[in-house]
Amino acid sequence: YKDNIRQMWVDPEGKSVSKEKKTEDDLLVYLHEEQGEIESYIIPVDSRGLWGRILGYLAIKNDGATVAGFTVYIHSETPGLGGEIEKSWFQKNFAGKKILDNEGNLVSVSIAKGAVKGKIPEPRYNNFVDGISGATLTGKFLSAGLKETLVEYEPLSIRFREKVTSQ
């Protein structure tokens, strides 16, 4: 962790802020670095769930558009239903998904109600993961929380897409 992850704060415009000068409007972000190069940035997710908060992390590749990974570390969802959000089989489906549509607009990555194929138009497949049977509301709440988080971090994502990641 200490060799590859660096914690930092960004202001609402996505610019780096020193820890000493951060305000309550600034956002926490983790940079995953290998050999001095940023591979991805990791943002905390705090979403409503069916029975309580869902806390996790969403990693975005340094292109500012592709999900590198997703994990949930705290939730109160029903075991065997919404609780499946903590399982690796569900979380691994986020890797490679896009937070932008084909026109480059932020649309987030969402959880479909059931399987993506047959429910979602094909041009949007890259923006959805298969839902969990019996956990429609968990998927709905988590999808909304992911979008809210990504909207908040969009200025940082734009800086990565434009390759402007320094001050």
Image (cartoon, rainbow, N blue to C red):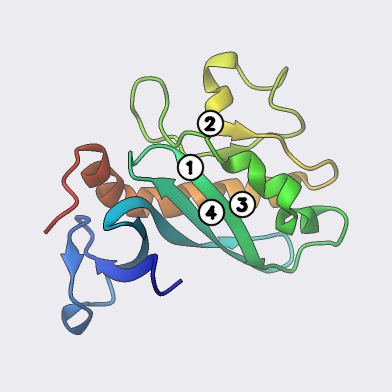
49 or 102, nearer to the observer: 102
Pointer 3 residue: 142
Residue drawn 14% across the image and 55% down it = 166
Graded by Cα atoms within 10 Å as few (under 14), some (14 to 19) or many (20 or more), the crowding at tag 2 reads: many
Pointer 1 residue: 67
Q: CA distance from mark 2 to mark 4?
A: 15 Å
Q: CA distance from mark 3 to mark 4?
A: 5 Å
Residue drawn 71% across the image and 35% down it = 130
Q: Secondary structure at mark 3?
A: helix
Residue found farthest to the right: 80
Q: Is residue 100 rendered to the left or right of residue 155? A: right
Q: Position of residue 73 (x, y in %)?
A: 64, 68
Pointer 4 residue: 145
Q: Is residue 39 rendered to the left or right of residue 49? A: left
The amino acid pointed to by label 2 is: Asn
Of the numbered discs 3 and 2, the one sitting upstream in the chain is: 2
Of the numbered discs 2 and 4, the one sitting upstream in the chain is: 2
Of the numbered discs 3 and 1, the one sitting upstream in the chain is: 1
Q: CA distance from mark 4 to mark 1?
A: 15 Å
Q: CA distance from mark 3 to mark 2?
A: 14 Å
Residue found farthest to the bottom: 20
Figure label count: 4
Query: Contact, CB < 8 Å: mark 4 with mark 1?
Result: no
Of the numbered discs 2 and 1, the one sitting upstream in the chain is: 1
Query: Contact, CB < 8 Å: mark 3 with mark 1?
Result: no
Q: Position of residue 34 (x, y in %)?
A: 36, 56
Query: Contact, CB < 8 Å: mark 3 with mark 4?
Result: yes
Q: Quadrant of residue 128?
A: top right
Graded by Cα atoms within 10 Å as few (under 14), some (14 to 19) or many (20 or more), the crowding at tag 1 reads: many
**Disc number for residue 127:** 2
Query: In this orientation, does residue 110 appear?
Result: yes
The amino acid pointed to by label 4 is: Gly
